[in-house]
Amino acid sequence: MLSSEPMQKVRIIFLKQDRDGIVSALHEMGIIDLRKSSLQISDDVPAADFTEMSEALVKVDGAVRILSPRHVDASAKLSRQQIRAQLAANLDIDGIYALNSERQELAEDNKLLGYAKTVAGCFGQLDVDLGALRSETLSFRAVVANDKELARFRHAQSHARKSGEVVVHRAGKNKNLIFMAYKKGDESMDEALKSIKFTELDLHAKYLDSTPGEIIRKADKAIAGNEKRTYEINRQIDKLSDLNYSRLCVLRESLEIEARRGEASSMFKSTQKAIAVEGWIPKKRLGELRKRVEEASGARFVLEELKTDHGELAPTLVNRPKFLKPFDYLVEFYSIPRSDELDPAWIFIISFPIFYGIMVSDVGYGIASFILSWIIIKKTDPEGLMCNVAKIWRMSAIPAIVVGFLSDQYFGFSLNKFFVPAFTGFNWFSDITYIIVLTIFFGIFQVCLGLLFGFFNERRHGHTKLAISKLTSILTVVFGTIAVAGGFFHATTSGVAMGSAAVAVVMLIATGALSGVEAAEITNLMTHPLSYARLMGFGLGSIIIAQLIDQGFTPHFTGGAVGIAIAVVYLVIFILLHFLNMILSIFEGIVQGVRLNFVEFFSKFDKGSGVKYRPFEYKEVYTEKQM
């Protein structure tokens, strides 16, 4: 359970005449992670029609994106002959592109018309023919500035020599048009503009060819015509969507499959008559692979189980229930575990929800966590980081509710007496000593477990001294804990404490002597277990803040209009402060729970930098695999 799936590297050699059948079989099985063969023969080349299929895929994919989505019934994957027949059929792909191109041109034209209206609107009723603002000797500029910037412009202009003409027109609330005409090459107007913030108007933009009023009138008419034509185009595209969307989706997926199979050829080796394919598969599926290749080739093949080269790392594949996959996503986001080491995700799956539950420790906050995480899951990309974190958060909300019930915390109130009056859980204040001891011992356990994982990993790699240093580190932590507990807290007799201290010192020296790498981690053997006390610190802090909010801002109705108004104000503050405390508690619960696992636990054994298992496969959406 604590190891990834055992993998086997294989080599399949088959005749070129069986190529299509075997590649199709491998693709449909979806179990081989292809690798470049080490055989000293020529690289294979894609099938002759690979370029044709790739170009067709780009064209069909673009057409599908233009059309309006429609329901698509699953269909069998199209063969290459069927693909060519579909491409030659009357799917009107060129017509789809032409309509979309025209629609884009109309949209761009409307933008230009809209800009012309904006510029003309700034000039208002000024009797200016914008189409006549062309001169070999004069420059014309128009900018829009607010009242403050206009005052600064006038001040700057008053200190400069008189140059050209300036007309100021009110273009709206706190919005002024500054229209300037001056000799070309005269920089004084430009210098005045440098002192203010403004928006420049392009007086040479398309459609600025007459007076402001005429420009607006013609633009409105042109926009209406463009919108009418756009509406007609959309109706035509909708009709084409009804006719062709389903067929094009099936065609696109079939082309994607053919293109992927063509790309896979770059990993093959070939001779004049044979092809060699290498890759990794799960060991337990070796028989299934052999049977399927035999069927596809008519038993004309050779399947070799290869020994891995020195230092070659098998890809990592873990098989976990679907609802636990978000934990794998987060672990891989940190670093992909190596296939030759113990899988750290199971401990993370168990410990993170517990950590979060202790630090949040409130029924109300736990329920809110569940609701908020559920909303995020519904609103975000299922494959994205946010959605996967939200799924972990939703699972972790359950322990937060449980610990909140055990500690009798409901937004800082004690409400168990109304539901289970005879139940007595624990109290964060009176049991604080036990809680902090429990969290530290939890840290000691997890740190030692990490060191034990490190022992197994290093022994597997043949690093005997480093592996033994992991065991001496465990003994250092265990006996050091007994010594501290006895010497400072009288948990043991003085003799046991002294003996444990002596053993801890010897083990500490042995650790340093066995491995310089582990010696560098000696200080962490003391600090990392203590880091788990933050579970108590953040949990207690959240509860104290919640109770202070309850004491200071719980609404009290004293009667009368003033009393009701005060109660409403108190209620708003009460809800707002609890919301902020809840967000802080949730944030710390997630961040610190992840940190304790990734830093204090993973650092003891997990090297990461593994290779993710990426099988040669496709996921059918509109087509069905022909197994």
Image (tube, rainbow, N blue to C red):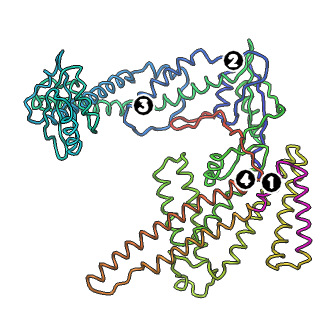
Q: CA distance from mark 2 to mark 1?
A: 43 Å
Residue 167, position in %: x, y? 13, 33
Compute the Cα span from label 3 to label 1. 51 Å
Q: Secondary structure at mark 1?
A: helix
Q: Give amino acid for label 2.
A: Asp
Whichever of labels 1 and 4 marks the residue nearer the N terminus, that label is 1
Choose between 189 and 587: the one closer to the eye. 189
> Which one is closest to the eye, mark 2 or mark 1?
1
Q: Looking at the figure, which quarter contains the C terminus?
A: top right
Q: Count residues near mark 2 (Cα–Cα under 10 Å), then give few for <14, some for 14-19, many for 20+.
A: some
Q: Measuring from the top left, give residue 111's x and y in whole percent.
A: 26, 31
Residue that appears at 81% across and 34% down:
311
How many residues crowd around disc 3 within 10 Å: few (fewer than 14), some, or many (20 or more)? Answer: many
Front one among 341 and 268: 341
Q: What is the span of residues highlighted in magenta in the rendered image?
A: 497-526
Say which mark, if any, is on residue 64: 3
Q: Residue at x 60, y 51 (%)?
A: 326
Query: In the rendered image of this protein, does residue 595 appear above or below residue 88?
Result: below
Asked where in the image residue 608 lies, by quadrant, the reply is: top right
- The residue wearing badge 4 is 602
Mark 4, Cα crowd under 10 Å, few <14 / some 14-19 / many 20+, is many
Q: Amino acid at mark 1?
A: Phe
Q: Which residue is mark 1?
A: 453
